[in-house]
Amino acid sequence: MIDSDTFRSVLGRFASGVTIVTARDDAGQDHGMTVSAFCSASLEPPLVLVCVDHAASMHGLLLGHANIGINILSSLQEAYSRRFADDEDQRFDGIAFTRGECGVVLLDDALAHLECVITEHHDAGDHTVFLARVERAEPRDGRPLLYYRGGYAQLER
Ligand SMILES: Cc1cc2nc3c(=O)[nH]c(=O)nc-3n(C[C@H](O)[C@H](O)[C@H](O)COP(=O)(O)O)c2cc1C
């Protein structure tokens, strides 16, 4: 089996976008975290997947709450990516957003929003893979925020 440094180094060479996954708890409190392990899983039906660390504070919430928002970040939202990955209590303070039909936070100026319903989850080592059906989705014009080899990058075209 390969060592974790090699694994990180190799996987870091797969450039990705960055998302903020949002959900609401039973008390109506918003939660959100930065997730780059996001991709499409099926076209018909439209399914996406996100992988969430067992240690993430949202992990338990996602196991019990089906509705999530997925915000694909634009190149102007690197600060959001940092904020939703840092040890910060008030992640939504001062951030402009609207709510989807099911109440989840959809960040203003994101490159795209998806409103999804989690349909399945599977344990995968120290993460859980959540499969979610896309109920609504909205693209915007703009440029993506990229993540590559442990740092942020911009598209050059
Ligand atoms: C660019 C970036 C991508 C990340 N992608 C993921 C991911 O796909 N899955 C995950 O569980 N954590 C990911 N993280 C780490 C979480 O965002 C981070 O651990 C966060 O603090 C977890 O939320 P919590 O502090 O509320 O537990 C990523 C962090 C960054 C900066």
Image (tube, rainbow, N blue to C red):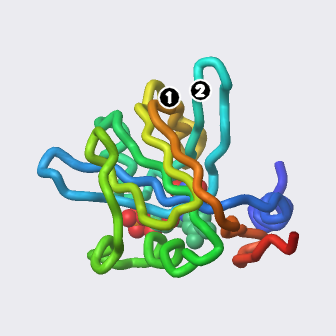
Residue 133: which disc? 1
Cβ of mark 1 under 8 Å from ligand 1: the answer is: no
Residue 111: which disc? none
Residue beneath disc 2: 46
Q: Relative to 49, say whether 93 is above or below.
A: below
Q: Relative to 35, say whether 85 is above or below.
A: below
Observer-nearest residue: 96 or 153?
Answer: 96
Residue 153 is situated, as x and y percent measured from the top left of the image, at: 75, 76
Look at 50% across and 32% down and name the residue there.
134
Look at 64% across and 60% down and name the residue there.
141
Q: Are marks 2 and 1 in contact (CB under 8 Å)?
A: yes
Look at 55% across and 58% down and name the residue there.
19
Tell which circle, 2 or 1, labels the residue nearer the N-terminal end.
2
Residue 88 is situated, as x and y percent measured from the top left of the image, at: 34, 78
Residue 130 is situated, as x and y percent measured from the top left of the image, at: 51, 36
Give the class, few, some or many, for how many residues have Cα within 10 Å of label 2's Cα (few <14, many ≥20): few
